[in-house]
Amino acid sequence: QAQRAKLDRLPDPTVGVHYGQERDRQEKILGVTVALPFGGSGRRADHAVALARATMATERTRQIRLKVEGDAHRALSAVRLSRSRWEQLSRLAEQMQATAATMRRGYELGELDLAQTLTAQRQALEAALGAQQAELDAIEAYARLRLDAHEIWALEHDHPGE
């Protein structure tokens, strides 16, 4: 629109030809009309407004692009962080399970009392539960990223004809 308004500021000549007859077709008239409009302050103002609107649209597009890129970076960071947390908690759960097994063996040999053994077993179960919850969080973050990228549940207009 700004480009069109800029072009409207330039003179746009119009040439016309007309033909007519008068006095019972005894006189024939041939005329040529040339119109050369001059761009005035109104057209300059229209161009300035269109240019301002184009600048605003460009800036709005840039802001939206930055927001979308920021959201994508945050979503990707969330996936990486949740996966890292899941891996750490999984390793911890394995260690806790090994400790609980060792304590269970110590109880069987009479070296540890039942309270210590049950406490270790409870802690191992809680660690396993925490690891499973972290796994679900990682899966959710990954699914959210894929959904936002339209890789799953793509809208119909994204893949016409499918």
Image (spheres, grey):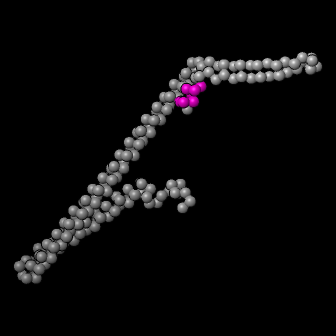
User: 27 left or right of 17?
Assistant: right
Nearest the viewer among 80 and 33 is 33
Does the magenta run of residues contain 3?
yes
Quadrant of image for the C terminus = bottom right
User: Is residue 113 found left or right of 37 in the rendered image?
Assistant: left
15 vs 145, nearest the viewer: 15
At a point 57% along the width and 30% down the height, the residue shown is 4
Question: For this rendering, which residue is in front, 46 or 129?
Answer: 46
Indicate whether 21 appears above or below 94.
above
Give the percent coordinates (x, y) of residue 100. Answer: 15, 74
Residue 4 sits above or below residue 123 on the image: above
Q: Residue at x 41, y 54 (%)?
A: 148
Q: Is residue 102 visible?
A: yes
Query: Relative to 9, is 58 above or below?
Result: below
Residue 21 spot, x, y in % from top left: 88, 20
Observer able to see residue 126? no
In the picture as drawn, the residue positioned furthest to the left comes out as: 111
Q: What main secondary structure does the magenta stretch of the protein show? A: helix
The spot of residue 9 in percent (x, y) is: 58, 23
**Residue occupying the point 15% across, 76% down:** 101
Q: How many labels were placed on the picture? A: 0
Where residue 104 appears, as percent x and y from the top left, is 13, 78
Task: Please state the extent of the stretch shown in magenta in the rendering.
Answer: 2-8
Horizontal relation, residue 56 to residue 138: left or right: right
Q: Quadrant of the N terminus?
A: top right
Identity of the residue drawn at 23% across and 66% down:
90
- Say if the magenta span includes residue 27: no
Residue farthest along the bottom direction in this orientation: 109
Image side of residue 119 versus residue 45, left or right: left
Instruction: Between residue 85 and residue 80, name the one nearer to us.
Output: 80
